[in-house]
Amino acid sequence: MIRLAEVSKTFNRGEVNEVEALRGIDLEIAPGSFTVLLGSNGSGKTTLLNVISGAILPSAGNIYIRSNEVTDLPEHRRSRWIARVFQDPLGGTAPDLSILDNFRLAALRTAAKTLRIGINDAFRKKVQDTIAELGLGLENKLQQPMGSLSGGQRQALTLLMSVMDHTDILLLDEPTAALDPKSADVVLRTAEKIIGKFQLTTIMITHNLGESLRFGNRLIQMDQGRIIRDLNASEKEKVRLEDLYQWFQ
Ligand SMILES: Nc1ncnc2c1ncn2[C@@H]1O[C@H](COP(=O)(O)OP(=O)(O)OP(=O)(O)O)[C@@H](O)[C@H]1O
């Protein structure tokens, strides 16, 4: 689904502040997998998501999505495959608009220009049914302003909004960093349901070690622009929290 071959990214090349953010990354991400990305500050995690999404282009190497080479494709040309959610649960939505209007805006952003999306009964029902499946109890509150929801509820809906329209890949950049532990858990359980329902290929950055063990079926650790650990599902299951603390010694 996603393949990186010898991908490197150097910022400010030749200057005193030159940084090798990615150094020869070789990585294959299987369709439908949920990869958790760990690593200390500055290890290259966000840069890795940025080169996959096209927010930045690599200095060297090749990137493939669904067997298409996308190395030099700008972000907007990859957005039909990729949804990205960041840590700020307040970002990306309009607080004064209702939940339903926010879903409509999200649909308009991704829809083909010729497609008209109104708040007709079919659209409302689709949104209502999809929200109901998440078990958040928000399906009968579609007229409530987005800003009146808790950070966790809002982040869960942001996730759903970002993937409802034909996304294959979900990139989560510390989606729970701004949430209390209970809300973080609700959001990640919601994410798991969404990932399953839409069969998304997911990569999530987190600094929360407990989270990295509870969620996902692959665990990757980065350090200084390189992948230094890469565990499959059965290897990941054997890892304990104490082991993870050791990884960061
Ligand atoms: N646009 C940029 N210009 C210059 N340097 C950058 C840029 N983006 C990232 N870097 C540098 O590249 C290195 C990797 O940064 P990156 O944000 O990918 O790390 P990270 O693992 O996501 O860190 P964190 O956990 O702190 O978010 C860092 O040294 C960072 O300062």
Image (spheres, rainbow, N blue to C red):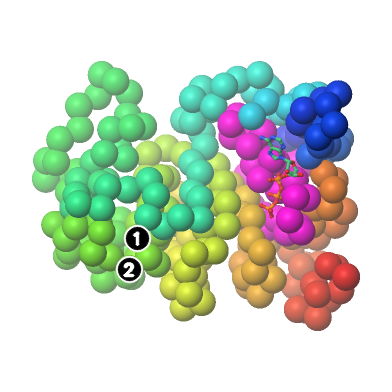
- Residue 46 to residue 114: above or below: below
Can you tell which quarter of the image residue 221 is in? bottom right
The residue tagged 1 is: 154
The front one of 90 and 74 is 90
Q: Amino acid at mark 1?
A: Arg
Q: CA distance from mark 2 to mark 1?
A: 6 Å
Q: Residue at x 76, y 31 (%)?
A: 11
Q: Position of residue 119 (x, y in %)?
A: 14, 41
Say left or right for 5 vs 123. Answer: right
Q: Residue at x 46, y 78 (%)?
A: 182
- Taking the image in four quarters, ligand 1 sits in the one at top right
Residue drawn where x is 55% and y is 42% of the image: 169
The secondary element bearing badge 2 is classed as loop
Q: Amino acid at mark 2?
A: Ser
The relative height of residue 90 versus residue 184 in the rendered view (above or below) is above
Image mark for residue 150: 2
Q: Residue at x 51, y 22 (%)?
A: 77
Q: Which quarter of the picture shows residue 52?
A: top right
| Residue 115 among magenta residues | no
Q: Is residue 239 above or below residue 34?
A: below
The magenta-colored residue range is 26-55
